[in-house]
Amino acid sequence: MSALEEVRREVRAARRVLVLTGAGMSAESGVPTFRGAQTGLWQRLDPRDLATPDAWEHDRERVWAWYLWRAALVRAVEPNAGHHALAALAEAKPVDVVTQNVDDLHERAGSRVTAHLHGSLFSYRCDTCGRPAPSPDLPAAPVERLAPPLCGCGEGWVRPGVVWFEEALPLDEWRAAEDAVLTLQRGDVVLVVGTSGVVYPAAGLPAMARSTGALVVEVNPQPTDVTDVCHLAVRASAAEALPALVD
Ligand code: NAD
């Protein structure tokens, strides 16, 4: 029996399904992965040099322009067949979606997201007082630099509501993710979709899930740092594999 067939049967029989998603989940919608190619204005910049508190400190106009471009890019694309398959599965049984993605494609496909571990491209807050800020207008075309608005407190700038490298995860999101993982039981299925498994603490969730007795399955065209933690691997893309798995 192929891995795909075996996982399809396990998903059908499962009481609950937990889905851990990373950037590969949205790749076929046209959202570049972190380690995939950057395009246009940004092609010579490593995202890891833009998504840090240090980058914000030293060149916040460049960071702000990059995030508004990414938000505009996500606004212009659609959920793919993988996102839709997960939303459809939730009509048949309980499904928790825990994502590292900062896009809103799971929600736009109709899924309720249990935890956005790395925040959202569509929430904004003051970098000093932390007060939520309204969403800015998104530029029609990418620009290299844009000044972020000043917060009403007069002390800080409005920043993207995402988690940067070196920052802690939002505690309530992490607790929701941990709770979804630690309440798994034998017979439940965990799908680890489109993540390279290198960004912690999110990358520790598949091992935590395995320790509950649930079946852990990787869905990724490539092997990753969490492959060895998974019982099975389906070597196909999210938009190909997920509709077949939840059929
Ligand atoms: P990553 O870029 O490190 O890894 C992407 C993984 O997806 C790789 O293992 C790759 O083989 C796989 N992949 C590529 N295309 C795929 C497809 N069509 N179907 C299934 N898998 C595919 O991404 P990551 O592990 O999520 O981690 C890095 C960080 O990137 C996270 O912090 C996340 O917040 C951020 N990020 C988010 C988005 C988004 O919101 N869409 C986009 C880029 C980066």
Image: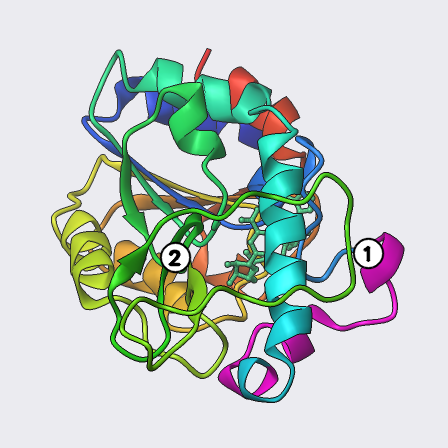
Residue name at image x 60 percent, y 52 percent: 68
Q: Is residue 190 magenta?
A: no
Q: Is residue 52 magenta?
A: yes
- Using a 10 Å C-alpha cutoff, classify the residue at mark 1 as few (fewer than 14 neighbours), some (14 to 19) or many (20 or more): few
Residue at 55%, 43% in the rendered image: 137
Give the vertical position of 59 relative to 44 (above or below). below
**Left or right: where 198 falls relative to 61:** left
Tell me the quarter of the picture where residue 151 sits: bottom left
Residue stretch in magenta: 39-55
Which of the pair 142/197 is nearer the observer? 142
Residue depicted at 22% across the width and 35% down the height? 187
SS label for mark 2: strand
Q: Position of residue 21 (x, y in %)?
A: 46, 46
The residue labelled by disc 1 is 37
x and y percentages locating residue 115 in the rendered image? 28, 49
Residue 114 occupies quadrant:
top left
Callout 2: 10 Å neighbours few (<14), some, many (20+)?
many
Dot label at residue 124: 2
Using the rendered view, name the quadrant where residue 214 is placed.
Answer: top left
Whether residue 118 is visible: yes
Q: Is residue 5 visible?
A: no
As drawn, is 58 to the left or to the right of 42? left
As drawn, the label of residue 193 is none
Q: Is mark 2 within 8 Å of ligand 1?
A: no
Give the mark nearest the N terminus, 2 or 1: 1
- The N terminus appears in which quarter of the rendering? top right
Determine the residue positioned at 25% across, 76% down: 129
Label 1 SS: loop
Given residues 60 and 47, the one toward you in this image is 60
Drawn side of residue 95 relative to residue 243, left or right: left
